[in-house]
Amino acid sequence: MEEERLLFEPQTTQAPFLKTQTEYKGFLKGGVWWGFLFPQWIFRNKLNEHGTVIRNKARLVAQGYRQEEGIDYDETFALLEAIRLFLAYAAYMKFQVFQMDVKSAFLNGRLTEEVYITQPPGFSDPKHPDHVYKLNKALLVGKIDSTLFVKNYKDHVFLAQIYVYDIIFGSTKGKLCKNFEALMQAEYKMSMMGELTYFLGLQVKQSEKGIFISQGKYVREMLAKFELTTCSEMKTPMAPPLKLDKDSNGKSIDVTLYRGMIGSLLYLTASRPDIMYATCLCAIYQADPKESHMKAVKRIFRYLKGTPNLGLWYPRDSGFDLTAFSDSDFAGCKIDRKSTTGGCQLLGGKLVSWTIKKQNSVSTSTVEAEYVATGSCCAWVLWMRNQLMDYGFQLSKIPIYCDNTSAIAIANNPVLHSKTKHIEIRYHFIRDHVMNGDVELHFVPTKYQLDDLFTKLLDEKWFNQLISELGMLNPDV
């Protein structure tokens, strides 16, 4: 109960014992709003990359009811772009990354408002069943880079990235890692996990030549979960031409099963950008999936069956210059005719971030769709530039490659004219950053547009060429 006493402070004030989250949100007493949270115990086995149980864990969470059992109840999500950036930097600086596990979460900060929590299941006070606990501390909620800690020592650098109770760290000087390990274990209850091999569902393999990121274990678990371990293999996740539509007259299927498969595929995109476009296309039809949509989803699984260990390769002999590619289809969605934005950002050729998003409004031309896409890509570039400041990089004139000359011309022209007056003002912020020298737009021929992987269906030859150029490797080949 030591950790419980740290987190909770008993109150003598009586309050209604709440049975459900929606039954009572809080009540007003003495002019102060009393907000109530509802605790739940989460029990899980912590596994390594081979599926072996290495620790049994129990966690008390409050209001952890947003995920639905059968769909995404067992999934966890984190800012994986920051993790990939950390590993890309480790590859560039040629140092090894280690991992530590916190036995009791210690990263907490004082609350500025009064929050109360009902008594945890199994730990209720029989003498005061209607009493509540006052929440004394909460997990730290920070901004973009609040989980990254950097220490410079002469010509060396030490970095640590902390996610609640998991820590990854590395340094160009081995002694700094040893000192950090000794300090943390002296101050807190920590377990040294050794070289980083498995973190937040990502399998990480470090070697003298580089760092390889994959999710082969998760792929095999998915195939077993949905009984597709014996399915035939496919060379691509989806084949052109695009035939997927709403299929109003088609036969409906189990919605829960379809959404569960989509959720699993979306989690896999943390290391598999090759399936992102096909998965997002299938995700559009989650409201009322048909047999044709399930057939498309199963094709993605059949592609994964043949490439379970495909992943991202970060070579140690590459540079660290930030470049980006922006692209868009035009009126690609057959339901509302909205275009899709695609973008990817690389550090010295190491793919760190990528995104696919349907645009908020219908574009009236390919120029407009491409221009909106460049604005979205610029926002991601600026986020990465801010992240890289903590790594000691001051970047400007970051190149963004686009295959539409008209969109580039609009971004470089500070004067609004008739062709752009209908575009929402918020998309014009890219002009300011071009004028300020933060980014530069460059033309790239379509045959060299790496972002095609995120905006259109490709034949097998072009598909394999793009995933190779984006730094994806299959160790089985």
Image (tube, rainbow, N blue to C red):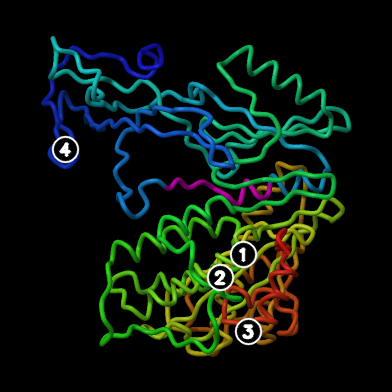
> Which amino acid is tagged 3?
Asp
Q: Which mark is residue 459?
A: 3
> Which amino acid is tagged 1?
Thr
| Residue 414 rendering spot, x and y as whole percentages | 65, 77
Is mark 2 in CB contact (under 8 Å) with mark 1?
Answer: yes
Tell me the quadrant of the picture where the C terminus can be found: bottom right
Per the rendered image, the range of residues in magenta is 75-85
Say which element carries label 1: loop
Q: In this rendering, which labeled residue sits more in front, label 3 or label 1?
A: 1
Q: Which residue lies under the disc numbered 4? A: 20
Please rate how many residues cluster around mark 4, counting C-alpha atoms within 10 Å: few if below 14, some from 14 to 19, many from 20. few
> Which amino acid is tagged 2?
Tyr
Q: Which residue lies under the disc numbered 1? A: 307
| Residue 250 rendering spot, x and y as whole percentages | 28, 84
The residues bearing labels 2 and 4 have C-alpha atoms spaced at a distance of 43 Å
Front residue of this view, candidates 51 and 97:
51
* Residue 248 located left or right of residue 175: left
Q: Could you tell me how many numbered marks the image carries?
A: 4
Front residue of this view, candidates 194 and 11:
194
Tell me the quadrant of the picture where the N terminus can be found: top left
